[in-house]
């Protein structure tokens, strides 16, 4: 389902969005057939960029952490989608163990965990929270935002089952992206459903694998719709064996920046786009907007100052960045109250359940907005539907956000393909560059 979303956003839809609206019936049938062959992740969120001439995902998170930023009006659809996801994963589940990040000070993240727990509880399971943090040795109350509190308990491993004291769940949902590695406590479980699978964690997962899968999905979708897949797909390349502090791998970075800029310039000429292309360089694994920079010239990779090198060298959990993805930059045309904005769409199972704008007044339209200074503007629902409003004006919010829901679901489908391709025992995907 794609909900109607209400926002103050104004402006005419571009040609791409018109094509999506006109073909909505064919699009929904295409998705329905795709989901017969692929199992959606339990949940996910997608960062989108609308450049006016291009609408594309720039990141897909399989451990979404912003449910607290969704409107209260989004909860009924989220609960309904969670029911479908639980039924798919473990129909008889009555108890669910939710494993959050090891944060103890980020009160907004903890509010996210509580909101997620509320959704799951209303979907019909008893929810308790178990921590991978070795410092949590007894039930501990953590202060969350808005005066809330979260009770986390130490995990207990008994043979090949994981639970809490007096709690033996059928279903385990991880909201920890596993950047620090794959905990032994989560490995080798039997007769319990663990979601997402371990290879979805950043200890294993790579953004380049995801965008390789997305390129396949986008090409199939574009062929069905009769459009150029570039309009929904950012070009990318990868570099391994990079050491920003030791200045190793600079040649690979410089060459791939030049290659990407040349490809984007050719597309800009083809569509008469009056923009200066740029490339986003970021760690191939990890979240939280760490290790991200914008580049407009290949020589920029040779002239990084020490502060930038240090920022790019380390990711979440202090993990050394040795592999990077170089991605075509997609500028945003959206702004809210003088701040540049990008939509973030949240999904459970195959359903769009809400979203928000990430707004940052301190960053440019060609920069990473997931950075200090950002804030969130929820997108409340007018009501759930899986069709745009053809009786409304093309620039009305329900129609614009139908397009956003389509592209977000393409990224979710790509995540399904990605997880299939990278599952243990499967041959690894090729590092496609577009």
Image: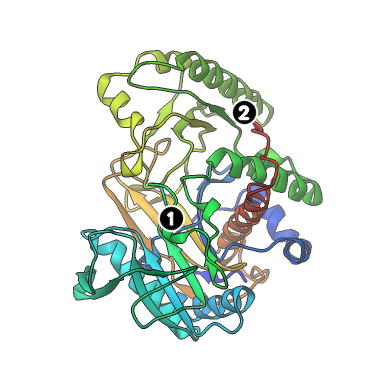
Q: Position of residue 378 (x, y in %)?
A: 39, 65
> Which label is found at residue 6?
none
Mark 2 or 1 closer to N-term? Answer: 1
Query: Does 264 sit left or right of 118 as displayed?
Result: right
Going 35% across and 51% down the picture, which residue do you hit? 359
Query: Does 195 sit left or right of 155 as displayed?
Result: right
Q: Nearer the viewer, residue 80 or 286?
A: 286
Query: Does 137 sit left or right of 66 as displayed?
Result: left
Going 56% across and 22% down the picture, which residue do you hit? 261
Q: Quadrant of residue 227?
A: top right
Against 417, is 328 above or below?
Answer: above
Going 46% across and 58% down the picture, which residue do you hit? 63
Q: Where is mark 1, residue-wise?
A: 184
Q: Nearer the viewer, residue 143 or 28?
A: 143
| Kind of element beneath mark 2 | helix
Q: Quadrant of the C terminus?
A: top right
Q: Quadrant of residue 391?
A: bottom right
Q: Quadrant of the N terminus?
A: bottom right
What's the distance in space between the residues labelled 2 and 1, CA to CA? 49 Å
Q: Position of residue 16 (x, y in %)?
A: 66, 48
Of circles 2 and 1, which is in front? 1
Image marks 2 and 1: residues in contact by CB distance under 8 Å: no
* Residue 343 in sight in this render: yes
> Which label is found at residue 268?
2
Against 51, is 25 above or below?
Answer: below
Q: Nearer the viewer, residue 19 or 35?
A: 35
Going 37% across and 33% down the picture, which residue do you hit? 320
How many C-alpha atoms fall within 10 Å of the one at disc 2: few (<14), some, or many (≥20)?
some
């Amino acid at each position: 389902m794609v909900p109607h979303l209400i926002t103050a956003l104004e402006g005419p839809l571009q040609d791409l969005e018109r094509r999506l609206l006109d073909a909505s019936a064919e699009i929904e049938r295409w998705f329905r057939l795709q989901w017969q062959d692929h199992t959606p992740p339990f949940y996910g969120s997608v960062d989108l960029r609308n450049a006016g001439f291009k609408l594309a995902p720039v990141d897909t998170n399989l451990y979404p952490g912003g449910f607290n930023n969704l409107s209260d009006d989004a909860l009924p659809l989220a609960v309904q989608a969670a029911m479908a996801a639980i039924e798919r994963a473990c129909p008889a589940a009555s108890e669910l163990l939710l494993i959050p990040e090891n944060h103890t000070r980020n009160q907004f993240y903890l509010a996210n965990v509580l909101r997620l727990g509320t959704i799951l509880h209303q979907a019909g399971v008893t929810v308790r929270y178990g921590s991978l943090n070795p410092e949590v040795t007894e039930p501990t109350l953590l202060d969350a935002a808005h005066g809330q509190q979260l009770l986390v308990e130490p995990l207990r491993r008994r043979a090949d089952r994981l639970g809490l004291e007096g709690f033996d769940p059928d279903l385990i949902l991880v909201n920890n992206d596993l950047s620090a590695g794959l905990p032994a406590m989560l490995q080798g479980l039997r007769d319990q459903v663990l979601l997402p699978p371990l290879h979805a964690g950043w200890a294993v997962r790579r953004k380049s694998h995801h965008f390789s899968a997305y390129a396949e999905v986008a090409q199939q979708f574009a062929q069905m719709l009769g459009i150029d897949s570039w309009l929904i797909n950012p070009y990318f390349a990868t570099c391994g064996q990079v050491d920003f502090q030791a200045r190793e791998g600079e040649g690979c970075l410089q060459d791939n920046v030049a290659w990407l800029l040349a490809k984007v310039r050719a597309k800009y000429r083809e569509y008469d786009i009056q923009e200066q292309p740029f490339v986003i360089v970021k760690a191939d694994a990890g979240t939280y907007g760490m290790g991200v920079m914008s580049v407009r010239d290949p020589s920029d990779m040779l002239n990084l100052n020490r502060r930038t090198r240090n920022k790019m060298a380390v990711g979440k959990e202090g993990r050394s960045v040795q592999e990077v993805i170089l991605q075509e930059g997609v500028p945003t045309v959206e702004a809210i109250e003088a701040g540049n904005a990008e939509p973030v769409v949240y999904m459970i199972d195959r359903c769009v359940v809400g979203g928000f704008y990430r707004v940052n007044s301190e960053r440019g339209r060609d920069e990473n907005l997931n950075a200090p200074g950002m804030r969130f503007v929820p997108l409340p629902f007018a009501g759930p539907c899986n069709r745009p409003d053809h009786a409304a004006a093309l620039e009305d919010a329900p129609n614009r956000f139908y397009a956003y829901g389509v592209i977000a679901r393409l990224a979710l489908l790509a995540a399904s393909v990605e997880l299939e391709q990278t599952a243990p025992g499967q041959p690894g995907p090729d590092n496609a560059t577009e």
